[in-house]
Amino acid sequence: VGSVVVLHVAGSVDHLTYYQLEEAIQTQLDRRQMNLVVNLSDLTYISSAGINTLGHAVSQYEKVKGRLSYVRPSNTAQWHFFTTIGVDQIFPWSTSVEEALKRVSH
């Protein structure tokens, strides 16, 4: 969308599939894509490997002075998990793709 890439993650990110998310984010970094939105609104489960992938992406984007935002899961239990482990405070969250696009575009 304009100068922003939106990655849409649906379903489960577990110890077998987290690498697909990792590769997708790394591909954007390799392409020097500085504005990234990762839409987690359809996420139903994420493992610790998936959480680590999201955390690594935050630090990678900070290093290159890029802009990254995650769209909150619409699944209440999944969002509660994020708040329980505290990443709601340290990851850059938006409540919608539109909000995320605004956040990373300027």
Image (spheres, helix red, strand yellow):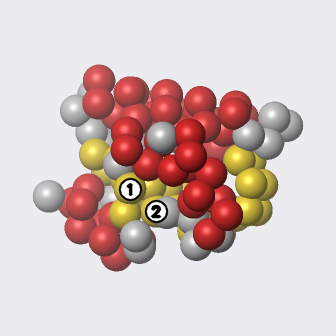
Which of the 4 image quarters holds residue 74? bottom right
Q: Residue furthest left?
A: 106
Residue appearing at x 81%, y 35% in the figure: 15
Q: Position of residue 2 (x, y in %)?
A: 30, 67
Label pair 2/1, CB-CB below 8 angstroms:
yes
Q: Quadrant of the C terminus?
A: bottom left
The amino acid pointed to by label 1 is Trp
Disc 2 residue type (three-letter): Val
Furthest toward the top, the residue is 63
* Side of 42 relative to 56 (left or right): right
Q: Determine whether 71 is above or below 58 in the image.
A: below
Residue 71 numbered tag: 2
Q: Position of residue 89 (x, y in %)?
A: 37, 44
Residue pictured at 70% horizontal, 31% vertical = 49
**Residue 56 visible in the picture:** yes
For marks 2 and 1, the one nearer the N-term is 2
Residue 52 image position (x, y, % from top left): 59, 30
Q: Which residue is mark 1?
A: 93
Q: Is residue 65 left or right of residue 37?
A: left
From this view, report whether residue 97 is shown above or below residue 39: below
Secondary structure of the residue carrying numbered label 1: strand
Task: Identify the element where label 2 is drawn.
Answer: strand
**Residue 11 location in percent, x, y?**
76, 62
